Amino acid sequence: YRILRAVKNRFGSTNEIGIFEMQTCGMVEVKDSSELLISKGKELPGSVVVCAMEGTRPILVEIQALSSKTPFGLPRRMSTGLDYNRVTLLTAVLEKKVGFNLYDQDIFLNVAGGVKITEPAVDLGVIISIASSFKNKSIRPMGVIIGEVGLTGEIRNVNFIEKRIYEAEKTGFKYCVIPKNN
């Protein structure tokens, strides 16, 4: 599979991505890219599905977190596909506002499928995936998590909520966790 992102586009947005599969006849468009990037119906601690916008296109991706007690004095924070500084900030919010003691936990985050997400609408999914791994409890399957998290711990509304919910419904998900203001 290959992800193609336009850097410059005279007639449209540069934030759009295309997902293609390399076949013997060349690159072929993947019609339902969300199906490719998620594993539906599995109850695994630390794994949640979020809906991010790539330009005007909603895309469902799986965020995976691993929280593990560190034997060293300084815990590690690593992320692949998410901004490291944003992950550190969200971990601090989880410690301060929820009361989780993550000071002795290494935290690793990964966006499955190699997608890079920069939008804050996946914040709630990041926090829930870290909490799920830390408590070793899976969340209810077949759900999508959408929401931005502020520094004071509030869940903030996001744009294009209807498109996000429609994409989740179209892909077969049964519920969405969204901000109250949406």
Image: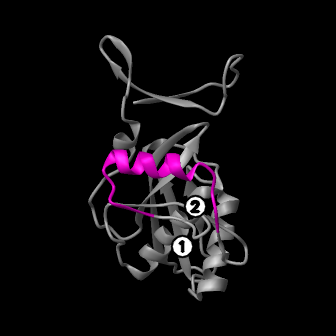
Label 2 crowd bin: few (<14), some (14–19), many (20+), radius 10 Å: some
Q: Is residue 177 left or right of residue 158?
A: left
Q: Which residue is mark 1?
A: 106
Where 18 falls versus 61 (above or below)?
Answer: above
Label 2–label 1 contact, CB within 8 A: yes
- Tell me which amino acid carries mark 1: Asp
169 in the magenta segment: yes
Q: Which SS class for mark 1?
A: strand
Q: Is residue 112 visible?
A: no
Colour convention of the picture = one colour
In percent of width and height, residue 2 lies at: 45, 28
The residue singled out by tag 2 in the image is 78
Residue 57 visible in the picture: yes
Residue 55 sits in quarter: top right
List x then y, in percent, for residue 181: 62, 67
Query: Does residue 12 lie above or below 90 as drawn?
Result: above
Which badge, 2 or 1, comes first in the chain's sequence?
2
* Left or right of 151 in this view: 114: left
Front-lying residue, 125 or 22: 125
Residue 179 screen position, x and y as percent: 57, 67
Which residues lie in the magenta part? 156-176
Alpha carbons under labels 2 and 1: distance apart:
8 Å
Residue 99 percent location from the top left of the image: 59, 89
Residue at 43%, 74% in the rendered image: 132
Front one among 31 and 7:
31
